[in-house]
Amino acid sequence: MEWLTAPFEVTFVQRALWGGILVSAICALAGTWVVLRGMAFLGDAMSHGLLPGVALAALLGGNPLIGAVLSAAVMTAGVTALGRAPKVSQDTGIGLLFVGMLSLGVIIVSRSQSFAVDLTGFLFGDVLAVRERDVVLLAVALLAALTVAVLGHRAFLALAFDPRKAHTLGLRPRLAHAVLLGLLGLAIVASFHVVGTLLVLGLLIAPPAAALPWARSVRAVMLLAALTGAAATFGGLLLSWHLGTAAGATVSALAVALFFLSHTGSLLWHRARGARRNGADPTSARPTGEATPEPRA
């Protein structure tokens, strides 16, 4: 039992745990829509698009968080504007913004004498360096993300499954898409300090994707995703403490491992249930008129 509790008796590990749990909840609120709408590439592009603002803030001696917020705003505005361009596909626009912002960030960082340290911290984060102030900021960010998720739930839902119906119902899909990009940016900005931009997708995508086989509603996906992310945070910090591995990377890797375990378990469970049904009455056929279950979104 001491093996489980000993790491969390240390103050900075406790703060890391709380920080990771809050980040997991924020990422669950935004990541669920990312998974449902197939926006993983956009999430990756936006996470790397923070580099210019963070680098410029570090170079000028400012707050990197403010620089990250500004970069996220630029990325959100750029993706929204290019999405309305008639002759430019969304993937093309996102890819160009991705490369352009990343290149600009590397140029800015290269002017700093602490290039290696700054870039490493930005890419991989430092969950063990979470301070009390960071925990408070993450709590505020979670409250903001929860407010946006609740108020925009109906519009986000229609946008994810039937954008034309969203327009018919007067839900303003373009505005909803822009607000959703803002929610995604908030999740990435809140998370990059903890796990870094290269690893943020682990908490943004893996927990919601792991929850999909077991949830029957979008809200259930969000709840299970938050719990999965919290479990990955706890387990990742525990393994990192005892194995001497990088904490942020271990948390992200465990989140991805839980995704594979979830889908493997779901596949085995459905096969076992099908075998039990066939064993109970191997000659039985599906009643006429009964629809074949469709895969859940």
Image (cartoon, rainbow, N blue to C red):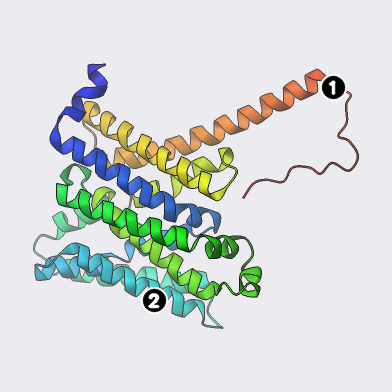
Q: Vertically, is 189 above or below 296?
A: below
Instruction: Decide which of 130, 152 is in the foreground and name it.
Output: 152
> SS for tag 1?
loop
Q: Vertically, is 32 above or below 75?
A: above
Quadrant of the rendering where the N terminus is positioned:
top left
Q: Which residue lies under the disc numbered 2?
A: 77
Mark 1, other Cα within 10 Å: few <14 / some 14–19 / many ≥20? few
* Amino acid type of the residue that numbered disc 1 sits on in the rendered structure: Pro
Report whether residue 110 is seen.
no
Q: Is residue 130 left or right of residue 101?
A: left
Tally of numbered discs: 2
Instruction: Decide which of 87, 6 is in the foreground and name it.
Output: 6
Mark 2, other Cα within 10 Å: few <14 / some 14–19 / many ≥20? some
Check if mark 1's residue and mark 2's residue have beta carbons within 8 Å.
no
Residue at x 14%, y 35% (from the top left corner)? 11
Q: Is residue 218 left or right of residue 289?
A: left
Q: Position of residue 31 (x, y in %)?
A: 44, 53
Q: Position of residue 261 (x, y in %)?
A: 49, 32
Q: Position of residue 144 (x, y in %)?
A: 34, 59
Q: Residue furthest right?
A: 288
* Amino acid type of the residue that numbered disc 2 sits on in the rendered structure: Ala
Q: Quadrant of residue 19?
A: top left
> SS for tag 2?
helix
Q: Is residue 184 left or right of residue 33?
A: left
Q: Position of residue 252 (x, y in %)?
A: 35, 42
The residues bearing labels 1 and 2 have C-alpha atoms spaced at a distance of 58 Å
Residue at x 67%, y 24% (from the top left corner)? 272
Give the mark nearest the N terminus, 1 or 2. 2
Q: Vertically, is 72 above or below 216?
A: below
Q: Which mark is residue 282?
A: 1
